[in-house]
Amino acid sequence: MANYILSCTSTADLSKEKFEKRDIRYIRFHFNLNGVDHEDDLGETMPFHEFYNRMANGEMTKTSQPAIGDYEAYFRELLKENKNILHVCLSSGLSGDLNAATLAASHLMDEDKDVRIIVLDSLAASSGYGLLMDAAADQRDAGLSMDELAMWINDNKLRVHHWFFSTDLKYYVRGGRVSAASGFVGNLLHICPLLNVSNEGRLVPRAKVHGVKKVEKEIVERMKQWADNGLNYADKCFISHSDCMGFVQPIVDMIEEAFPNLKGKIEIYSIGTTIGSHTGPGTVALFFFGKKRVD
Protein backbone atom coordinates (compact mmCIF):
# COMPACT_ATOMS: atom_id res chain seq x y z
CA MET A 1 0.00 0.00 0.00
CA ALA A 2 1.50 3.34 -1.05
CA ASN A 3 2.11 5.89 1.71
CA TYR A 4 1.05 8.80 -0.50
CA ILE A 5 -1.96 9.96 -2.51
CA LEU A 6 -1.84 10.09 -6.32
CA SER A 7 -3.85 12.99 -7.68
CA CYS A 8 -4.69 14.86 -10.90
CA THR A 9 -7.53 16.93 -12.40
CA SER A 10 -10.85 16.08 -14.02
CA THR A 11 -9.33 16.98 -17.40
CA ALA A 12 -7.61 13.58 -17.49
CA ASP A 13 -10.94 12.51 -19.01
CA LEU A 14 -11.32 9.12 -17.39
CA SER A 15 -14.63 7.88 -16.03
CA LYS A 16 -15.51 8.26 -12.37
CA GLU A 17 -15.43 4.46 -12.10
CA LYS A 18 -11.92 4.34 -13.58
CA PHE A 19 -10.61 6.99 -11.18
CA GLU A 20 -12.08 5.10 -8.24
CA LYS A 21 -10.83 1.71 -9.42
CA ARG A 22 -7.28 3.03 -9.79
CA ASP A 23 -7.46 5.07 -6.56
CA ILE A 24 -6.58 8.32 -8.33
CA ARG A 25 -8.01 11.47 -6.75
CA TYR A 26 -8.96 14.47 -8.86
CA ILE A 27 -9.90 18.12 -8.53
CA ARG A 28 -12.62 19.48 -10.79
CA PHE A 29 -12.26 22.19 -13.39
CA HIS A 30 -15.30 24.38 -14.15
CA PHE A 31 -17.21 25.31 -17.27
CA ASN A 32 -19.84 27.90 -18.08
CA LEU A 33 -22.58 26.96 -20.52
CA ASN A 34 -24.86 29.72 -21.74
CA GLY A 35 -24.06 31.87 -18.71
CA VAL A 36 -24.53 29.14 -16.09
CA ASP A 37 -21.55 27.80 -14.11
CA HIS A 38 -21.01 24.05 -13.71
CA GLU A 39 -18.36 21.73 -12.31
CA ASP A 40 -16.57 19.37 -14.66
CA ASP A 41 -17.86 16.33 -12.78
CA LEU A 42 -17.25 13.68 -15.46
CA GLY A 43 -20.75 13.93 -16.89
CA GLU A 44 -22.60 13.21 -13.65
CA THR A 45 -24.88 16.27 -13.51
CA MET A 46 -24.86 16.98 -17.23
CA PRO A 47 -24.54 13.92 -19.49
CA PHE A 48 -22.01 14.38 -22.27
CA HIS A 49 -24.61 13.91 -24.99
CA GLU A 50 -26.63 16.80 -23.58
CA PHE A 51 -23.54 18.99 -23.25
CA TYR A 52 -22.42 18.46 -26.86
CA ASN A 53 -25.95 18.73 -28.21
CA ARG A 54 -26.31 22.12 -26.55
CA MET A 55 -22.99 23.21 -28.04
CA ALA A 56 -24.13 22.04 -31.47
CA ASN A 57 -27.28 24.11 -31.03
CA GLY A 58 -25.21 27.24 -30.52
CA GLU A 59 -24.90 27.60 -26.75
CA MET A 60 -21.61 29.24 -25.77
CA THR A 61 -19.07 27.68 -23.40
CA LYS A 62 -16.16 28.96 -21.32
CA THR A 63 -13.86 27.11 -18.95
CA SER A 64 -11.90 27.93 -15.81
CA GLN A 65 -9.21 26.10 -13.87
CA PRO A 66 -9.27 25.63 -10.10
CA ALA A 67 -8.06 28.79 -8.33
CA ILE A 68 -5.30 28.75 -5.71
CA GLY A 69 -7.97 28.75 -2.98
CA ASP A 70 -9.71 25.79 -4.61
CA TYR A 71 -6.44 23.89 -4.60
CA GLU A 72 -5.75 24.72 -0.97
CA ALA A 73 -9.17 23.42 0.05
CA TYR A 74 -8.73 20.29 -2.09
CA PHE A 75 -5.25 19.52 -0.74
CA ARG A 76 -6.41 20.12 2.84
CA GLU A 77 -9.06 17.42 2.42
CA LEU A 78 -6.49 14.97 1.09
CA LEU A 79 -4.06 15.83 3.89
CA LYS A 80 -6.62 14.59 6.41
CA GLU A 81 -5.86 11.13 5.00
CA ASN A 82 -2.16 11.38 4.20
CA LYS A 83 0.58 14.00 4.59
CA ASN A 84 2.14 13.05 1.24
CA ILE A 85 0.53 13.96 -2.09
CA LEU A 86 1.80 13.54 -5.65
CA HIS A 87 -0.31 15.78 -7.87
CA VAL A 88 -0.01 15.87 -11.67
CA CYS A 89 -1.44 18.91 -13.50
CA LEU A 90 -3.00 19.50 -16.89
CA SER A 91 -0.37 20.51 -19.47
CA SER A 92 1.17 23.92 -18.80
CA GLY A 93 1.01 24.44 -22.56
CA LEU A 94 -2.79 24.56 -22.33
CA SER A 95 -3.56 25.95 -18.87
CA GLY A 96 -2.25 27.83 -15.84
CA ASP A 97 -3.23 24.86 -13.68
CA LEU A 98 0.40 24.12 -12.74
CA ASN A 99 0.93 27.59 -11.26
CA ALA A 100 -2.20 27.46 -9.10
CA ALA A 101 -1.40 24.00 -7.75
CA THR A 102 2.25 24.87 -7.09
CA LEU A 103 1.41 28.04 -5.14
CA ALA A 104 -1.23 26.25 -3.07
CA ALA A 105 1.14 23.38 -2.28
CA SER A 106 3.92 25.78 -1.29
CA HIS A 107 1.62 27.63 1.09
CA LEU A 108 0.46 24.42 2.79
CA MET A 109 4.02 23.10 3.14
CA ASP A 110 5.09 26.41 4.73
CA GLU A 111 2.18 26.07 7.12
CA ASP A 112 3.02 22.50 8.18
CA LYS A 113 6.56 21.15 7.86
CA ASP A 114 5.28 17.56 7.99
CA VAL A 115 3.34 18.07 4.74
CA ARG A 116 4.91 17.09 1.45
CA ILE A 117 3.20 17.84 -1.87
CA ILE A 118 4.97 17.23 -5.18
CA VAL A 119 3.36 19.02 -8.14
CA LEU A 120 4.25 17.95 -11.68
CA ASP A 121 3.39 19.09 -15.20
CA SER A 122 1.85 16.27 -17.25
CA LEU A 123 2.48 18.01 -20.61
CA ALA A 124 -0.64 16.02 -21.52
CA ALA A 125 -4.39 16.46 -21.85
CA SER A 126 -7.66 14.54 -22.05
CA SER A 127 -7.34 10.76 -21.96
CA GLY A 128 -3.63 11.03 -22.87
CA TYR A 129 -3.26 12.63 -19.45
CA GLY A 130 -5.49 9.81 -18.24
CA LEU A 131 -3.24 7.20 -19.85
CA LEU A 132 -0.24 8.72 -18.06
CA MET A 133 -2.11 8.64 -14.73
CA ASP A 134 -3.22 5.04 -15.29
CA ALA A 135 0.39 4.01 -15.96
CA ALA A 136 1.52 5.99 -12.90
CA ALA A 137 -1.01 4.04 -10.80
CA ASP A 138 0.54 0.82 -12.14
CA GLN A 139 3.97 2.00 -11.01
CA ARG A 140 2.62 3.07 -7.61
CA ASP A 141 1.01 -0.35 -7.16
CA ALA A 142 4.30 -1.99 -8.12
CA GLY A 143 5.87 -0.33 -5.07
CA LEU A 144 7.47 2.89 -6.27
CA SER A 145 7.92 5.55 -3.61
CA MET A 146 6.51 9.04 -4.17
CA ASP A 147 9.92 10.37 -5.26
CA GLU A 148 10.52 7.39 -7.52
CA LEU A 149 7.12 7.80 -9.12
CA ALA A 150 7.65 11.54 -9.63
CA MET A 151 10.89 10.71 -11.44
CA TRP A 152 9.15 8.01 -13.49
CA ILE A 153 6.40 10.43 -14.58
CA ASN A 154 8.94 13.07 -15.63
CA ASP A 155 10.96 10.47 -17.52
CA ASN A 156 7.95 9.01 -19.35
CA LYS A 157 5.39 11.77 -19.88
CA LEU A 158 6.77 12.72 -23.30
CA ARG A 159 6.26 9.13 -24.41
CA VAL A 160 2.48 9.65 -24.32
CA HIS A 161 1.31 10.47 -27.83
CA HIS A 162 -1.90 12.41 -28.51
CA TRP A 163 -3.31 12.34 -32.06
CA PHE A 164 -6.75 13.70 -32.77
CA PHE A 165 -8.97 15.09 -35.48
CA SER A 166 -12.03 17.28 -35.67
CA THR A 167 -14.93 17.05 -38.12
CA ASP A 168 -16.20 20.59 -37.53
CA LEU A 169 -13.91 23.61 -37.65
CA LYS A 170 -16.39 26.13 -36.26
CA TYR A 171 -15.25 25.50 -32.69
CA TYR A 172 -11.63 26.16 -33.71
CA VAL A 173 -12.80 29.38 -35.35
CA ARG A 174 -14.69 30.34 -32.19
CA GLY A 175 -11.58 29.73 -30.08
CA GLY A 176 -9.37 31.72 -32.45
CA ARG A 177 -7.27 28.74 -33.56
CA VAL A 178 -8.56 28.94 -37.17
CA SER A 179 -9.60 32.04 -39.12
CA ALA A 180 -13.25 32.41 -40.11
CA ALA A 181 -12.32 32.20 -43.80
CA SER A 182 -10.22 29.04 -43.33
CA GLY A 183 -12.96 27.46 -41.24
CA PHE A 184 -15.59 28.18 -43.88
CA VAL A 185 -13.47 26.74 -46.69
CA GLY A 186 -12.39 23.79 -44.55
CA ASN A 187 -15.96 22.82 -43.70
CA LEU A 188 -17.02 23.32 -47.31
CA LEU A 189 -14.28 20.96 -48.52
CA HIS A 190 -14.80 18.50 -45.62
CA ILE A 191 -11.27 19.05 -44.31
CA CYS A 192 -10.54 17.32 -41.01
CA PRO A 193 -7.43 18.79 -39.34
CA LEU A 194 -5.12 16.22 -37.75
CA LEU A 195 -3.38 17.58 -34.65
CA ASN A 196 -1.17 16.38 -31.84
CA VAL A 197 0.32 17.61 -28.59
CA SER A 198 3.93 18.79 -28.84
CA ASN A 199 6.78 18.20 -26.39
CA GLU A 200 5.86 21.58 -24.86
CA GLY A 201 2.35 20.31 -24.21
CA ARG A 202 0.81 22.56 -26.85
CA LEU A 203 -1.76 21.79 -29.52
CA VAL A 204 -0.15 21.67 -32.98
CA PRO A 205 -1.86 21.14 -36.37
CA ARG A 206 0.03 18.49 -38.36
CA ALA A 207 -2.04 17.80 -41.50
CA LYS A 208 -5.21 18.71 -43.39
CA VAL A 209 -7.03 15.57 -44.43
CA HIS A 210 -10.03 15.46 -46.76
CA GLY A 211 -12.87 13.45 -45.28
CA VAL A 212 -13.53 11.39 -42.18
CA LYS A 213 -12.63 8.01 -43.70
CA LYS A 214 -9.20 9.26 -44.73
CA VAL A 215 -8.45 10.91 -41.41
CA GLU A 216 -9.51 7.76 -39.52
CA LYS A 217 -6.92 5.82 -41.52
CA GLU A 218 -4.32 8.56 -41.09
CA ILE A 219 -4.60 8.62 -37.31
CA VAL A 220 -3.91 4.87 -37.23
CA GLU A 221 -0.91 5.42 -39.53
CA ARG A 222 0.48 7.87 -36.98
CA MET A 223 0.24 5.17 -34.32
CA LYS A 224 2.09 2.75 -36.61
CA GLN A 225 4.78 5.41 -37.07
CA TRP A 226 5.25 6.41 -33.43
CA ALA A 227 4.18 3.53 -31.16
CA ASP A 228 6.74 1.64 -29.09
CA ASN A 229 8.00 -1.30 -31.16
CA GLY A 230 5.79 -0.39 -34.11
CA LEU A 231 3.22 -3.06 -34.93
CA ASN A 232 4.50 -5.10 -31.96
CA TYR A 233 3.20 -2.44 -29.56
CA ALA A 234 2.26 -4.23 -26.35
CA ASP A 235 1.04 -1.44 -24.07
CA LYS A 236 -2.36 0.20 -23.49
CA CYS A 237 -4.29 2.33 -25.95
CA PHE A 238 -7.00 4.86 -25.02
CA ILE A 239 -9.44 6.69 -27.29
CA SER A 240 -11.64 9.63 -26.30
CA HIS A 241 -14.38 11.30 -28.32
CA SER A 242 -16.90 14.12 -28.12
CA ASP A 243 -20.26 12.46 -28.75
CA CYS A 244 -19.24 10.80 -32.03
CA MET A 245 -18.88 7.11 -31.26
CA GLY A 246 -19.62 6.33 -34.91
CA PHE A 247 -16.18 7.66 -35.84
CA VAL A 248 -14.48 5.63 -33.12
CA GLN A 249 -15.38 2.05 -34.03
CA PRO A 250 -13.60 2.01 -37.43
CA ILE A 251 -10.43 3.22 -35.69
CA VAL A 252 -10.76 0.54 -33.01
CA ASP A 253 -11.14 -2.13 -35.70
CA MET A 254 -8.08 -0.92 -37.62
CA ILE A 255 -5.91 -0.72 -34.49
CA GLU A 256 -6.92 -4.14 -33.21
CA GLU A 257 -6.10 -5.63 -36.61
CA ALA A 258 -2.75 -3.83 -36.93
CA PHE A 259 -1.60 -4.26 -33.31
CA PRO A 260 -2.34 -7.83 -32.14
CA ASN A 261 -0.27 -7.51 -28.95
CA LEU A 262 -2.18 -4.66 -27.30
CA LYS A 263 -2.30 -4.78 -23.49
CA GLY A 264 -6.00 -5.41 -22.91
CA LYS A 265 -8.87 -3.93 -24.86
CA ILE A 266 -8.78 -0.38 -26.17
CA GLU A 267 -10.35 1.82 -23.50
CA ILE A 268 -12.86 4.39 -24.77
CA TYR A 269 -13.80 7.54 -22.84
CA SER A 270 -15.70 10.76 -23.43
CA ILE A 271 -13.84 14.01 -23.92
CA GLY A 272 -14.93 15.92 -20.84
CA THR A 273 -16.68 19.24 -20.62
CA THR A 274 -13.48 21.25 -20.07
CA ILE A 275 -11.51 19.98 -23.07
CA GLY A 276 -14.74 19.54 -25.04
CA SER A 277 -15.63 23.21 -24.59
CA HIS A 278 -12.68 23.95 -26.90
CA THR A 279 -12.94 21.04 -29.35
CA GLY A 280 -16.73 20.90 -29.71
CA PRO A 281 -18.60 17.75 -30.78
CA GLY A 282 -17.16 15.57 -33.53
CA THR A 283 -13.59 15.19 -32.20
CA VAL A 284 -11.77 11.87 -31.82
CA ALA A 285 -8.45 11.47 -29.97
CA LEU A 286 -6.04 8.52 -29.90
CA PHE A 287 -3.45 7.95 -27.16
CA PHE A 288 -0.58 5.47 -26.81
CA PHE A 289 3.02 5.18 -25.59
CA GLY A 290 5.79 5.67 -28.11
CA LYS A 291 9.05 7.39 -28.95
CA LYS A 292 9.61 10.60 -27.02
CA ARG A 293 7.88 13.63 -28.52
CA VAL A 294 10.53 15.99 -29.86
CA ASP A 295 8.63 19.04 -31.16
Image (cartoon, rainbow, N blue to C red):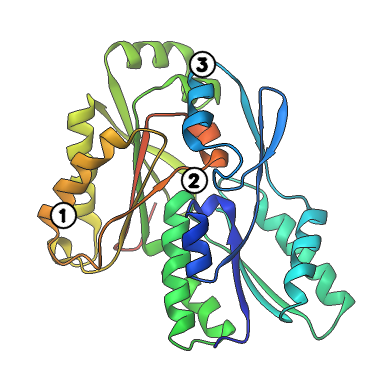
Image vertical order of residue 125 relative to residue 109, above or below: above
Image quadrant where one finds the N terminus: bottom right
Residue 196 position, x and y percent, is: 37, 44
| Label located before the other in sequence (2 or 3) | 3
Q: Which residue is mark 1?
A: 256
Alpha carbon distance from label 2 to label 3: 28 Å
Q: Is residue 255 visible?
A: yes
Secondary structure under tag 3 reads loop
Residue positioned 80% across, 69% down in the render = 76
Image vertical order of residue 175 relative to residue 257, above or below: above
Image vertical order of residue 13 relative to residue 189, above or below: below
Image vertical order of residue 104 relative to residue 217, above or below: below
Question: Residue 202: which disc?
Answer: 2
Left-right relation of 257 to 271: left
Left-right relation of 186 to 65: left
Q: Which residue is mark 3?
A: 57
Q: Nearer the viewer, residue 288 or 13?
A: 13
Task: Report the mark closest to the observer, 2 or 1.
Answer: 1
| Label located before the other in sequence (1 or 3) | 3
Secondary structure under tag 1 reads helix
